[in-house]
Image (cartoon, rainbow, N blue to C red):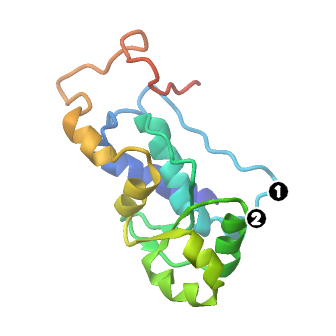
Amino acid sequence: MKESAQAALSYTRNKAQKLGIDPRFLEKQDIHIHFPAGAIPKDGPSAGVTIFTALTSLLTGIRVRGDVAMTGEATLRGLVLPVGGIKEKVLAAHRAGIKRIIMPERNKKDLNDVPEQAKREMEFVFAHSMDDVLRSALEEDPFDKAAKNPPPGDGEKPQTQEQQPQGTPQAHA
């Protein structure tokens, strides 16, 4: 889990400008990601894409779709690697009423084990990269949003808390 969270933070720093995030976001803020003591350490890699998506949502202010579930290991280079337990994860999401599942492209073959009814009632998005995940998981494409409204450049001062538009997420120390 800890490694997945660190990889998500590192990749977010690397992609900050393209995501419309001020690349200096950690200069005056700190991000602490906590998993309760009951978290299962071996489940960390499967949560990589989810941690990265949540972090991107927080920093861009773009909400995650309410009808989506996801799984996949995210690398530092932004690739989405395959994970185990696809049948169980898809069936759990189906029982919970989830309509869209985002999973690694290389797990497509694992859908052979999923009952046909669940497959008919759900949409599957097969991701090769974290960019694919973000475009499918968030309510708005963060790359399009950033292109229309780029973060402050090197010469610009970031907005103070009072100047930031309503609804912009604030990190608290």
Rendered view: 170 above or below 121 = above
Q: Is residue 107 above or below residue 48?
A: below
Q: Position of residue 71 (x, y in %)?
A: 57, 67
Q: Amino acid under label 1?
A: Gly
Of 113 and 97, nearer the camera is: 97
Is residue 54 rendered to the left or right of residue 113? Answer: left
Q: Residue at 30% across / 21% down in the picture?
A: 158
Q: Residue at x 37, y 62 (%)?
A: 132
Among all residues in the image, which is located at the extreme right? 38
Mark 1: few/some/many CA within 10 Å (<14, 14-19, 20+)? few
What quarter of the picture does the N terminus occupy? bottom right
* Numbered label tally: 2
Q: For numbered disc 2, what is the local secondary structure?
A: loop
Q: Position of residue 170 (x, y in %)?
A: 50, 25
The answer to which image quadrant residue 83 occupies is bottom right
- Depth order, front residue of 70/114: 114
- Residue 168, image x and y in percent? 44, 25
Q: Secondary structure at mark 1?
A: loop
**Above-or-below relation of 157 to 27:** above
Amino acid carrying label 2: it is: Ile
Q: Disc 1 designates what residue? A: 38
Location of mark 2 (residue) = 40
Q: Quadrant of the C terminus?
A: top right
Between marks 2 and 1, how big is the CA–CA gap? 6 Å
User: On the rendered structure, is 67 left or right of 164?
Assistant: right
> Is residue 6 among what the camera can see?
yes
Q: Are marks 2 and 1 in contact (CB under 8 Å)?
A: yes
